[in-house]
Image: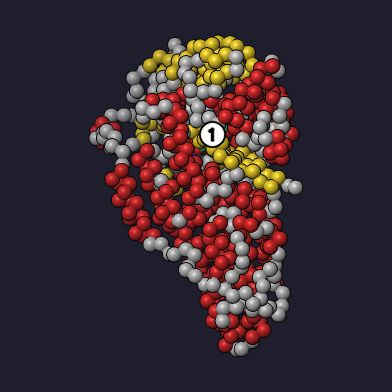
């Protein structure tokens, strides 16, 4: 029997579920349902990550024990997964007994193999990210290079995992499995990162208690990522359910957000190699959502609270929107305007209307009974077959938005078929046999569409089946039923409410705009135009660039400002190599007080856009003369 094992990340319990969590979980659910439809024995795992300093701190702030906090938050996740119709087969909590045991066993196994040793850790720790950083990896001012928040200096005895030993094996594994990480661009990032050299990884802490104790040395707790990643094998039965483990491991697909790719694509396979376990087949890193054009913040969260979205738009519309709106793997923006628009155009107009008009016709021309066709399905049947085939390929690449786009070719194609075969004319001209074939084909198109959308929108797919008079639960259906001609003539349809009522887009947008205006974060300090004008911004061209010795970040530049040539030292070395900079026309703050950086006098500053993990210097079109003032 074919099997499929898909996972979501396990979510930290220091926070309640939000749209980002819903996104990953819906995507994994769609994969699981799709594979079940295709006859795979499927294991779909989700759960919660409950150990670590972050959870300990959050619990303290709420005067709870970490376990009490976890118990209360877990319910919130489970409630949301219920409402989103998530069909997971197992929910793992890292405080579950079987998990803790498995992690300890695996720790011992890896230690016996010689891949864990006791050393001393000195470095910087970002609690929100649960990540250690070395001095050089941090941003200036001891900030976490991932989230930009302050890190804390720690020095303590620590167990280390010999990650460095696995560098070559990992690179070879990536070479042999180029699809291990998707999208492809992310695979490239991982390969470059590993090629830069891997350091051994600190995998225990002594400064707090909330974690799984290191076997034989209970002063240490196991680093939360070592603990968390092993959920994928513990929940699959490692050490307690041999049959399940043998059936399902290795995982076929870990769906995660791009921020936690390194853990999954580097540490995880290295741990598994060391433990002598087979490696997962794929890690897919999806992008991040911004909200109404802004980075997600506490106040913006309410605007896209998943419960609220479910109430306003319905579970299936939300599931559809999340996967249709943005190519899986890229970042996207979540706005109510886009959501309402998608619902109206794709769901109410294209899909809902198709079912509604089809049922209206069968009621009108055949008293609500599916007619006996007198000919084959023709072009529509061929289109359905082609779509099914393409879906397979697209779903295997987790290209959800393209899969839905392709599926909509069938929705639109069926609508077009209605228009071009004009059943109303056939009825008027009393061409009964042709009319019967056309109506049959339309209904059969709808039935197959219902089956194909069922992984994405299980409730609406079921409603479609019910209205078409098809018996049974669509979740139990299989792809054999997608063969053309499955709809039995004589079936009585049961026309019901429109699948998706039309939304008043304008009213929705106005409401959200009012809400956003009232939830704006406090205004930043304002400057007058005169204050701004004191700054002399000019276009300058970079003539020479070289790395500042012993600095990761600094690059020494010689620039032409139109009125002089001067040295500017810029902290852009982690994002640019010197040769890429020469010739660029950039904007500099020309009247900035000179400063000495690593002993070099810098006169001016280059403007650059920076975000959590990236930076781009602002470039000016090449035909702008140097010395031009920027106002
Ligand atoms: N506990 C770890 C995962 C351990 S897996 C062995 C963790 N948890 S988390 O709760 O912080 O994040 C879970 C997921 O939510 C991540 O995949 C992250 O990418 C995702 N998202 C958080 N905010 C998001 C958006 N704004 N948009 C999309 N996904 C986002 O990390």
Q: Is residue 43 left or right of residue 143?
A: right
* Vertical comparison of 282 with 547: above or below: below
> What colouring does the structure picture have?
secondary structure
Please state the horizontal and vertical placement of residue 11, each as a whole percent of the image.
Answer: 51, 36
Residue at the bottom extreme, as displayed: 429
Q: Count the numbered circles shown.
A: 1
Q: Is residue 555 left or right of residue 588?
A: right
Q: Is residue 166 left or right of residue 201?
A: right
* Vertical comparison of 603 with 449: above or below: above
Please state the horizontal and vertical placement of residue 474, each as a whole percent of the image.
Answer: 61, 60
User: Which residue lies at the image location 44% right of the left edge and 11% below the top edge?
Assistant: 599
- In the depicted view, which residue is nearer to us: 587 or 60? 60
Please state the horizontal and vertical placement of residue 469, each as a whole percent of the image.
Answer: 59, 70
User: Which residue lies at the image location 53% right of the left edge and 41% below the top edge?
Assistant: 287
Tag 1: Cα neighbours inside 10 Å, few (<14), some, or many (≥20)?
many
Work out which quarter of the rendered image holds the C terminus and state it.
top left
In the image, is the residue at mark 1 within 8 Å of ligand 1 by its beta carbon? no
One can see residue 24 in this view? yes
One can see residue 229 in this view? no
Q: Is residue 558 left or right of residue 236?
A: left
User: Which residue lies at the image location 68% right of the left edge and 63% below the top edge?
Assistant: 482
User: Which residue lies at the image location 48% right of the left edge and 54% below the top edge?
Assistant: 315
Q: Which residue is labeled 1 in the image?
A: 93
Occupied quadrant, residue 94 = top right
Say what secondary structure mark 1 lies in. strand
- In the depicted view, which residue is nearer to us: 463 or 409? 463
Please state the horizontal and vertical placement of residue 583, each as a whole percent of the image.
Answer: 52, 30
């Amino acid at each position: 029997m074919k099997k499929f094992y898909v996972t979501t990340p396990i979510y930290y319990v220091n926070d309640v579920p939000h749209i980002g969590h819903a996104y990953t979980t819906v995507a994994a659910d769609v994969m699981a349902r799709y594979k079940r439809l295709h006859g795979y024995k499927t294991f779909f795992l989700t759960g919660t990550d409950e150990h670590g300093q972050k959870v300990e701190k959050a619990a303290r702030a709420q005067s709870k024990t970490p376990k009490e906090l976890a118990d209360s938050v877990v319910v919130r996740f489970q409630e949301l997964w219920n409402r989103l119709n998530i069909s997971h087969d197992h929910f793992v909590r890292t405080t579950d007994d079987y998990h803790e045991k498995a992690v300890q066993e695996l720790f011992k196994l890896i230690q016996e193999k010689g891949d864990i040793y006791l050393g001393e850790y000195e470095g910087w720790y970002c609690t929100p990210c649960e990540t250690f950083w070395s001095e050089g990896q941090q941003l200036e001012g001891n900030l976490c290079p991932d989230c930009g928040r302050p890190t804390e200096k720690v020095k303590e005895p620590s167990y280390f995992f010999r990650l460095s030993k696995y560098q070559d094996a990992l690179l070879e594994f990536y070479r042999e499995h180029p699809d291990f990480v998707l999208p492809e661009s992310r695979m490239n990032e991982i390969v470059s990162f590993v090629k830069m050299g891997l350091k051994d990884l600190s995998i225990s802490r002594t400064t707090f208690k909330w974690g799984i104790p290191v076997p034989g040395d209970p002063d240490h707790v196991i680093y939360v990522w070592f603990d968390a990643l092993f959920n994928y094998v513990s929940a699959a039965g490692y050490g307690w359910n041999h049959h399940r483990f043998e059936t399902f491991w290795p995982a076929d697909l870990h769906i995660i957000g791009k921020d936690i790719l390194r853990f999954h694509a580097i540490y995880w396979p290295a741990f598994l190699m060391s433990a002598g376990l087979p490696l997962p087949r794929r890690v897919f890193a999806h992008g991040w959502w911004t909200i109404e054009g802004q980075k997600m913040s506490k106040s913006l969260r309410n605007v896209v609270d998943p419960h609220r979205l479910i109430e306003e738009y319905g579970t299936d519309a939300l599931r559809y929107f999340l996967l249709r709106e943005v190519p899986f793997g890229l970042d996207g923006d979540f706005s109510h305007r886009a959501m309402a628009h998608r619902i109206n155009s794709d769901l109410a107009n294209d899909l809902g209307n198709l079912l509604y008009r089809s049922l209206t016709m069968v009621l009108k021309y055949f008293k609500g009974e599916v007619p006996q066709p007198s000919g084959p399905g023709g072009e529509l049947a061929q289109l359905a077959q082609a779509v099914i085939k393409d879906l397979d390929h697209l779903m295997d690449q987790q290209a959800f938005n393209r899969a839905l786009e392709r599926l909509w070719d069938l929705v639109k194609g069926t609508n077009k078929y209605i228009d071009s075969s004009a059943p109303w004319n056939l009825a008027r001209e009393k061409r009964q046999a042709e009319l019967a074939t056309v109506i049959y084909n339309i209904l059969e198109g709808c039935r197959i569409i219902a089956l194909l959308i069922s992984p994405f929108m299980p409730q609406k797919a079921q409603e479609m089946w019910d209205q078409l008079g098809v018996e049974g639960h669509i979740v139990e259906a299989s792809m054999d039923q997608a063969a053309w001609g499955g709809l039995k003539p004589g079936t009585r349809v049961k026309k019901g409410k429109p699948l998706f009522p039309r939304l008043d887009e304008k009213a929705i947008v106005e409401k959200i705009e009012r809400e956003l205006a009232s939830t704006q974060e406090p205004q930043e300090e304002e400057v007058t135009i005169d204050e701004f004008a004191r700054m002399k911004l000019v276009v300058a061209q970079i003539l020479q660039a070289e790395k500042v010795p012993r600095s990761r970040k600094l690059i020494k530049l010689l620039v032409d400002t139109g009125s002089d040539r001067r040295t500017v030292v810029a902290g852009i070395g982690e994002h640019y190599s010197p040769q890429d900079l020469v010739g660029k026309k950039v904007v500099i703050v020309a009247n900035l007080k000179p400063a000495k950086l690593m002993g070099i006098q810098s006169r001016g500053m280059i403007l650059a856009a920076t975000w959590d993990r990236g930076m781009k210097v602002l470039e000016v079109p090449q035909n702008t003369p140097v010395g031009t003032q920027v106002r």
